[in-house]
Image (tube, grey):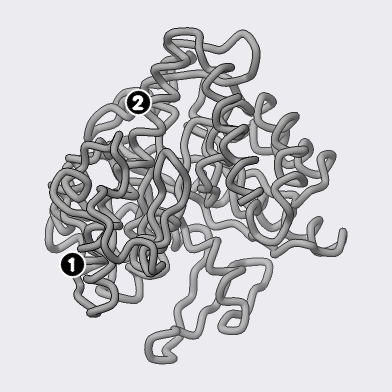
Amino acid sequence: MRTLRWAVVFEFQIVATDPQTAARAGEFRTPHGTVHTPAFMPVGTRGSVKGLTPAQLRDTGTEIILANTYHLALRPGADVVAALGGLHAFAGWDGPILTDSGGYQVASLAALREIDDDGVTFRSHLDGRMLRLDPGGAIEIQERLGADIIMPLDVCPRLPAAPESLRLAVERTLRWAGRSRDAHRRPDQALFGIVQGGLDPDLRAQCLESLRRFDFAGYALGGLAVGESPDEMFSLLRSLGPALPADRPRYLMGVGRPIDLFRAVACGMDLFDCVLPTRNGRNSMAFTTSGVVRLRNEQHRQSGRPLDETCGCYACRHFSRGYLRHLFLADEMLGPILVSLHNVAYYQALMARIREALAGGRLDRLLAEQEAGAVRQNAD
């Protein structure tokens, strides 16, 4: 790897590859610890992974979490986080942290924002006050938050989108990437670039080629899982994933169904985040090796089985499906906590199995098993 200014405290090394696919296992060293890839990042939008303590997250095997610039800028404010020691001390998490820039909120809060060539003006969803995010400002906020990995402000259009809308989104994303790179000052923070372009492979390739000149510490694919079908997404990923710089971490933003993680790893992706484990956990839905378990179903009323006989998490070691169902029906807060804990543990175990299969040359068999399981669940 070339010597970069961020390479003083960051290093990415490939430790295993799969001869049948573009999959690879790696180690990404950061100031707050090493992330073993492929890796899943639980989402802690406001500095907290909902319902779970940092110690519980560590027990699941989590190595890195994600937080959000837009939400933390609104409440409590970057100055408050900085005054309390930065995001790691503030949240009580001593491992690596990635902060999104607020670019996703450009899409998700479209009714509350105005976008122009220089940035985005949001009307706060909390109290209506105005928040201006421009490329330099988003970097400044993230430098005050102190995350290990930071993202530039970008434009993430919903799909399907008109060709002209996609072209404009890419033009702004590239312009803002350059301004973000110029604003970036802290060598203890790795700035990633974000490739946009919707489902247009030529536009994606053009965006990637333009981003290469900024020599980012890693490269992310944004603007996916925002309206397109899984088949459309993976048709793009099969060619685009392996085209990302091979010596940098590759991050697929916001994609998180278990089968999608397997398929994306086979396309060469390294880092993932999604709200599914905790959001579904709060809504009584558990991921297990035998499929999704919906705990409100009557069939679990007197079940003494754990959520997953193969899982060693706290919830599976101590509680039955019948008890967990009772917690949800009684509106007890422990239910969402325990199922969220299990779901995060399930995701981390899944990633560990992928890494082990890569190291042992067995990824093809593991992927085939997952594909067969997905077909069975869809049939059910």
Q: Is residue 123 above or below residue 116?
A: below
Could you say where residue 24 lies in the image, as x and y percent from the top left? 52, 18
The residue that label 1 is drawn on is 334
Q: Is residue 164 above or below residue 97?
A: below
Q: Is residue 336 rendered to the left or right of residue 128? A: left
Tell whether label 1 touches label 2 (CB within 8 Å).
no
Q: Is residue 90 above or below residue 220?
A: below
Q: Nearer the viewer, residue 84 or 225?
A: 225
Q: Disc number at residue 36? A: 2
Q: Disc number at residue 205? A: none
Residue at image coords 23%, 67%: 79
- Is residue 371 shown to the viewer in this render? yes
Could you say where residue 275 lies in the image, as x and y percent from the top left? 43, 58
Quarter holding residue 190: top left
Quarter holding residue 265: top right
Disc 2 secondary structure class: strand
Could you say where residue 213 lies in the image, as x and y percent from the top left? 64, 32
Q: Nearer the viewer, residue 96 or 327?
A: 327
Residue at image coords 37%, 21%: 27
Q: Earlier in the sequence, mark 2 or mark 1?
A: 2
Q: Nearer the viewer, residue 168 or 196?
A: 196
Q: Amino acid at mark 2?
A: His
Please tell me whether mark 2 or mark 1 is closer to you in this view: 1
Could you tell me how far apart the alpha carbons at marks 2 and 1 are, in whole angstroms? 31 Å
Disc 1 secondary structure class: helix
